């Protein structure tokens, strides 16, 4: 992890250097690295779910204020800090995310999370399973190094600490959209925004990058299958939405494997949640499944959505059931500007 943190800080720092990096660059990074590791472990031990990052926000806010930066809270649990060098130049924004996931941590690390919380009404364990603890710690370390290099820099650096990268709770507003709505990209307006994400693949200490499309768009789909309830002993008197749903789930995978040209662009359809029924011996009336669609190409995305609707509705109709398909876009394709890369 130390190598990942080192590489991440170096990448964030290099994004702000419009000329050669300062001579004392390495020394400053080496000096802050132990503190970055300490922060990361503290965030890891004390994770908070999306739009509930109150303690994380307070730690980040206080530290950025201590560096003498213009710092404010926004988007409920977000933080923005501004470093002005007093020398003319571009406005560069650096971004990190802060939220954790409803996941149980299964290891024996001394900084293991034992936190529990409520997630959409359910009791869950909470863990930084996606690396946001490292992202936040790296950006705090980057802020300290750049603050010490203030007189050697040009332009302005904006630090964006975003809540709810994983998406706000049901019925709530949050994340990047709320940050932007509340002015995180105004006064000053960044000329470019840089961010990164740690990963488990690849060699430690190495940075992987790619111009153009890098991360797929993300859509949330919901399919509601409505059948007819009956006793489990006489299923012919009803229309089983669970069986219909099982057929739909299998058929959705044939869209990827048989109906779209994945040589042109990759596609992923994943059903991650399915709910139905109240008792073991009753055929329920309705089943609901949720999942995600990941695509790189807008035309292919729409083609996949159209095929999903046709597939679900046709299978349901063949059994006398109905299927309603709703798709909600959560994120556009992450496109890396080739010149900036």
Image (cartoon, rainbow, N blue to C red):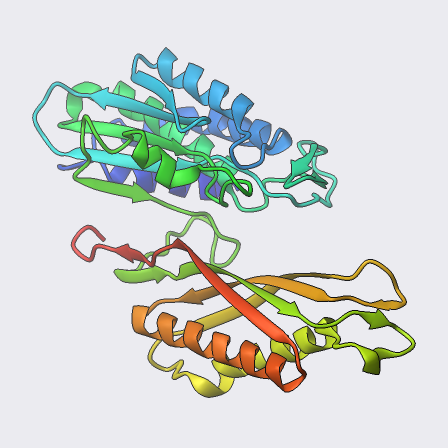
Q: What percent of the width, then of the height, locates residue 82? A: 26, 23
Q: Is residue 298 left or right of residue 307?
A: left
Tell me how many marks there are. Answer: 0
Q: Nearer the viewer, residue 156 or 289?
A: 289
Q: Nearer the viewer, residue 129 or 327?
A: 327
Residue at image x 45%, y 29%?
A: 33
Viewer can see residue 253:
no
Viewer can see residue 233:
yes
Q: Nearer the viewer, residue 250 or 199?
A: 250
Q: Is residue 166 left or right of residue 19?
A: right
Q: What percent of the width, then of the height, locates residue 304? A: 42, 75
Q: Nearer the viewer, residue 7 or 242?
A: 242
Residue at image x 13%, y 34%?
A: 90
Residue at image x 64%, y 69%?
A: 225
Q: Is residue 285 above or below residue 124?
A: below
Question: Going by the picture, which residue comes out furthest to the left?
Answer: 88
Quadrant in the rendering for residue 280? bottom right
Q: Is residue 103 above or below residue 142?
A: below
Q: What percent of the width, then of the height, locates residue 22? A: 20, 30
Q: Is residue 226 left or right of residue 278?
A: left
Q: What percent of the width, then of the height, locates residue 50? A: 53, 37
Q: Is residue 160 left or right of residue 280?
A: left
């Amino acid at each position: 992890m130390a190598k990942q943190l080192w590489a991440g800080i170096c990448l964030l720092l290099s994004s702000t250097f419009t000329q050669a990096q300062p001579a004392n660059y390495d020394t400053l990074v080496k000096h802050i690295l132990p503190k970055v590791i300490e922060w990361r472990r503290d965030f890891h031990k004390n994770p908070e779910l999306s739009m509930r990052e109150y303690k994380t926000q307070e730690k980040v806010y206080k530290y950025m204020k201590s560096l003498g930066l213009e710092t404010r809270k926004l988007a409920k649990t977000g933080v923005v800090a501004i470093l002005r060098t007093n020398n003319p130049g571009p406005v560069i924004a650096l971004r990190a995310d802060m939220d954790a996931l409803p996941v149980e941590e299964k290891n024996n690390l001394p900084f293991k999370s034992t936190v529990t919380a409520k997630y959409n009404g359910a009791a869950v364990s909470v863990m930084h399973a996606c690396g946001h603890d490292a992202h936040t710690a790296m950006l705090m370390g980057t802020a300290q190094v750049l603050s010490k290099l203030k007189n050697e820099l040009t332009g302005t650096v904006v630090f964006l600490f975003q809540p709810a990268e994983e998406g706000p709770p049901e019925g709530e507003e949050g994340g990047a959209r709320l940050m932007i709505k509340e002015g995180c990209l105004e006064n000053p307006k960044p000329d470019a925004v840089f961010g990164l994400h740690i990963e488990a693949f690849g060699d430690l200490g190495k940075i992987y990058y790619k111009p153009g499309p890098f991360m797929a768009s993300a859509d949330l789909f919901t399919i509601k299958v409505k059948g007819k309830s009956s006793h489990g002993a006489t299923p012919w008197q009803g229309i089983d939405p669970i069986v219909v749903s099982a057929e739909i789930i299998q058929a959705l995978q044939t869209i990827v494997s048989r109906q779209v040209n994945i040589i042109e662009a990759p596609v992923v359809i994943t059903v991650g949640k399915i709910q139905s029924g109240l008792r073991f011996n009753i055929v329920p009336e309705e089943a609901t499944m949720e999942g995600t669609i990941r695509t790189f190409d807008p035309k292919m995305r729409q083609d996949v959505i159209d095929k999903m609707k046709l597939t679900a509705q046709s299978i349901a109709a063949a059994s006398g059931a109905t299927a309603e398909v709703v798709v909600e876009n959560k994120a556009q394709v992450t496109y890396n500007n080739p010149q900036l890369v």
